């Protein structure tokens, strides 16, 4: 059966079921069995590959009880991102490359029904008065929705797929993003409670790296995670509290921001605070937490370089503390952060750790940096394939105080 024939068959069977079966009174298993029987009856003696038959049954079922076309896309573990620009334009990311799919949603209305299901699962709302929402799927996949008239091409949905297996440093070593030697150094820095900030552009792997790094946190510590949409996979910590923001309701009240959650977390006796991503005024509260005894905190932010991240942090802190002089802001940043790790997505779509830099302090009106590692391409690099590794600079880690407090006397 051709794709067009399969699509017409699925639509026909779905229409029949909607009109003739009491689906609201049927259990999921009962409905699935009924669909299976109807499909088998309609196919009759015609030959059809078993997999195609199974796909059609699942597609009919998911179009009634699930997320329709989206369910089959989400099942493909090789897809890392899904981009829906209205009902007719569906794009996916596979192996770092963006591909357009031939499939489409039946209508804008059907796409909106699916959006409402997704948003409702997490107890959030999206409508004409609040046309933008960040939410997540039950498996943890991150979802962003923008409705018309804000989205001119129709309802827009972007889904960052959630990895079924938590990211580890061993996997990052396997992918070539980092070396075993550097992983061991980072393990010591996390154990010694250095405040570490991970920066990079969109899709550079910040959350993935943060997940891997968080696995070095000692198991007996109390950790508070704070995110817009919960996606961190910290599995080794027993005393873990995960907090998630909430949008305002239709009346414009009830919003809970990252800033609110950081302030609240300070009253939870945290030993470490992990902020999924800082984007605005909450940067001030995060830095103040780092400066008031909550060492070992981890966070991420969008930036194209380490220096760019410091500039962005300055701007964000000033949003949270109007009237603060730039000198005071820079002193706050310099005393709070210990290590900045910069990631990048390169021309061959690979994600690499580009730089690991120590923050030395504030001097002569500037934040002083000490670059420890830098990514360098080797002679095997081409325009289509990047080859290289993180190389140790001649600079040594200067702030050994936290390492020595932890009983670690190895030079980094």
Image (cartoon, rainbow, N blue to C red):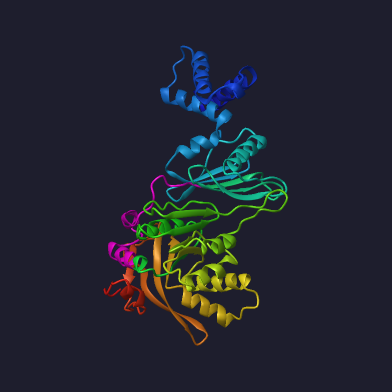
Q: Quadrant of the C terminus?
A: bottom left
- Whether 184 is among the magenta residues is yes
Indicate the position of residue 401 as horizontal and vertical percent values.
Answer: 35, 77
Asked whether residue 378 is in view, the answer is no
- Relative horizontal placement of residue 335, taking residue 282 as reference (left or right): left
Q: Toward which corner of the image does residue 206 lie, by quadrant?
A: bottom left
The image quadrant that residue 399 belongs to is bottom left
Q: Position of residue 186 (x, y in %)?
A: 34, 66
Q: Position of residue 68 (x, y in %)?
A: 56, 33
Q: Is residue 109 depicted above or below 324 in this figure?
A: above
Q: Quadrant of residue 371?
A: bottom left
Residue at image position (60%, 20%) is 17
**In the drawing, does residue 320 fall left or right of residue 344?**
right
In the displayed structure, 19 sits above or below 197; it is above
- Magenta stretch containing residue 201, yes or no? no
Depth order, front residue of 340/214: 214
Q: Which residues are magenta?
A: 160-188
Q: Residue furthest left?
A: 410
């Amino acid at each position: 059966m051709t794709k067009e024939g399969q699509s017409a068959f699925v639509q026909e069977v779905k229409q029949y079921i909607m009109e003739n079966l009491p689906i609201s009174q049927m259990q999921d298993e009962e409905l699935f069995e009924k669909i299976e029987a109807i499909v088998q009856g309609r196919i009759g003696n015609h030959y059809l590959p078993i997999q195609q038959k199974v796909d059609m049954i699942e597609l009919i079922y998911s179009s009634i009880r699930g997320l329709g076309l989206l369910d089959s896309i989400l099942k493909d573990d090789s897809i890392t991102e899904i981009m829906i620009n209205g009902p007719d334009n569906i794009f996916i990311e596979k192996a770092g490359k963006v591909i357009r799919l031939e499939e489409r949603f039946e209508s804008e209305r059907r796409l909106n029904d699916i959006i409402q299901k997704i948003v409702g699962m997490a107890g959030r709302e999206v409508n004409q008065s609040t046309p933008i929402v960040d939410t997540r799927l039950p498996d943890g996949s991150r979802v962003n929705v923008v409705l018309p008239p804000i989205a001119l091409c129709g309802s827009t949905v972007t889904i960052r797929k959630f990895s079924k297996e938590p990211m580890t440093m061993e996997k990052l070593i396997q992918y070539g993003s980092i070396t075993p030697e550097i992983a061991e150094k980072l393990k010591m820095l996390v154990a010694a409670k250095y405040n570490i900030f991970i920066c990079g552009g969109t899709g550079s792997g910040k959350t993935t790296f943060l997940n891997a790094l968080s696995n070095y946190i000692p198991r007996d510590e109390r950790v508070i995670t704070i995110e817009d949409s919960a996606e961190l996979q910290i599995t080794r910590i027993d005393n873990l509290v995960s907090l998630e923001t909430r949008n305002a309701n239709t009346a414009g009240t009830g919003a809970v921001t990252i800033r609110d959650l950081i302030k609240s977390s300070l009253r939870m006796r945290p030993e470490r605070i992990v902020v999924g991503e800082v984007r605005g005024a909450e940067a001030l509260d995060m830095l103040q937490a780092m400066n008031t005894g909550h060492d070992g905190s981890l966070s991420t932010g969008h930036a194209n370089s380490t220096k760019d991240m410091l500039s962005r942090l300055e701007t964000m802190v000033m949003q949270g503390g109007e009237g603060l002089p730039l000198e005071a802001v820079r002193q706050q940043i310099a005393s709070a952060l210990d290590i900045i790790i910069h990631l990048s997505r390169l021309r061959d779509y690979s994600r690499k750790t580009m730089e690991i830099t120590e923050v030395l302090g504030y001097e002569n009106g500037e934040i002083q940096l000490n670059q420890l590692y830098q990514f360098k391409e080797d002679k095997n690099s081409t325009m289509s394939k990047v080859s290289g590794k993180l190389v140790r600079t001649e600079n040594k880690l200067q702030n050994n105080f936290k390492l020595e407090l932890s009983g670690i006397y190895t030079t980094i």
